[in-house]
Amino acid sequence: MSLKLYNTLSRRKETFVPLNDKQVGIYVCGPTVYNFFHIGNARPFLIFEVLRRYLEFKKYKVKYVTNFTDIDDKVINKANEMGLLFSEVADKYIREYFQDADCLNIGRADVYPRATEHISDIIKFIQGLERKGYTYAVDGDVFFDVNQFKDYGKLSKQNLDEIKVGARIELDERKRNPYDFVLWKKAKAGEPFWNSPWGEGRPGWHIECSVMSEKYLGESFDIHAGGSDLVFPHHENEIAQSEALSGKQFAKYWLHNGFLKIENQKMSKSLGNILTVRDLCKRYQGSVIRHFLLSAHYRSPLNYSIEQIEQSKNSMETLNNLIYNIHFLLQQNDFSLEIDSESEGLLLKNEEIIKNFIQAMDDDLNTPVALSTLFLLAKETNRYLSSKGLKNKDVLQSVLDFYDQYGDGVLGLKYLSETQEQGQISEKEIQEMIRKREVARENKDWKTADEIRQQLKEKGIILEDTAKGVRPKKV
Ligand code: AMP
Ligand code: ZN
């Protein structure tokens, strides 16, 4: 089975064929570091990291690069507001980024290039474009001349004459064409600047990604990704700059995620409904948020609501409880080595579910369907566990392996069975209460024994009396 990815460049799903068999290069546009990132931003950070996990599961070697935009108007404004240097603001929010990425279990990229650490590469790149006749300079600003690049508009499928004035197009009378964009920006008084052949200034918005992707992945690489708002003009402009300079195809596959809304509204400062990952991580375990973010296909819109995230919380609890219950049986040697027909049935089901998981992920990373397979196996396994008789060790282990390899390994979901959630009863406490109940029962103190059973029940644990003694079960 082969992986298919929807390529914005062709507007269809294409079979993924890497450019070479050494490594798959992925470049994802990262955050502008002037604030905590919100759960909308988390969508691309997370889904493209899942893409990496899945490619690695398929035995590809991946090099994953994601940048930090550490200089732009927003970073400068924030620095002025806070009375800090722009670099201090950037350093702070890069640190905060990693804290929140860790909450969501977003694995590390191989390289995190920063725009300001690549100024000389950026200048050389612009000089290359200048030599080829793609630029013009006006009063210390350098523009890219889109009329010189015949493929301009190929990603956003727009014709130069028809492109409507959209977001993030800066109107400027000095431009030859309104879609020309700035490669190098003259510094205003009091702004940070670097020296360049065009005077003191700083890089424009788009150039850093062209320069840094080329530096770490080469002129042509496999996958370039980001949120759908970046298709135009950011990615269109990246293609123009990079292909104008190299004369080669820039990225082969372009992937874009849909937007996240809150209670069906756009997330925006003016509506006061920006939800940061930092805040949400105070209320929910990272895997619950991760489950929620993966619960819609990455290209579809996703709506955040309390009901939705609570549903994800319940879903994760189902998995946590199941895994806890299986671990418990295995730890207590409470299993059989015989295979009966029910065990065989679950093994077969497990294999079928693995196939369905892979089929879903192969289909342009269909994470909602992949997630549903995790719950289908949970349902089947719970049925198996509640049937009479000892359970087969290999079957129990194969269920754990599935959650380990697919739920955790590919989708990055961490279960709480090993690491207890804060505020939840610990394994030690459960065992201690069971022991006290046993003592009470030996002393025929039925009242205390019942009270303990009731206390455990209130914490979601029921006690089952089995031939091997009392067994706690999370429900
Ligand atoms: P920024 O820091 O604004 O450059 O955004 C970082 C990434 O988050 C980009 O790939 C954006 O396209 C993406 N993004 C921003 N807002 C949302 C949203 N509400 N839903 C999904 N992705 C978003
Ligand atoms: Zn970018």
Image (cartoon, rainbow, N blue to C red):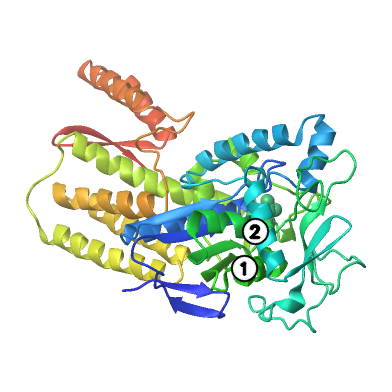
Q: Nearer the viewer, residue 101 or 443?
A: 101
> In the rendering, at what x and y percent does residue 253 appear?
51, 71
Residue 304 visible in this rendered orientation of the protein: no
**Is 259 placed above or below 456 here?**
below
Q: Residue at x 73, y 83 (%)?
A: 159
Q: Is residue 319 shown left or right of residue 155?
A: left
Q: Mark 2 belongs to which amino acid?
A: Phe
Q: Which mark is residue 125?
A: 2
Asked if residue 220 lies left or right of residue 31, the reply is: left
Q: Residue furthest top?
A: 443
The answer to which quarter of the image holds residue 469 is top left
Specify which label sits upstream in the sequence, 2 or 1: 2
Q: Nearer the viewer, residue 433 or 176?
A: 176
Query: Residue flagged by tag 1: what amino acid is it?
Result: Leu
Q: Residues within 10 Å of mark 1 (few under 14, many from 20)?
A: some
Residue 245 marker: 1
Ligand 2: image quarter:
bottom right
Give how far apart the Cα atoms at labels 2 and 1 are: 8 Å
Q: Is residue 141 visible?
A: yes
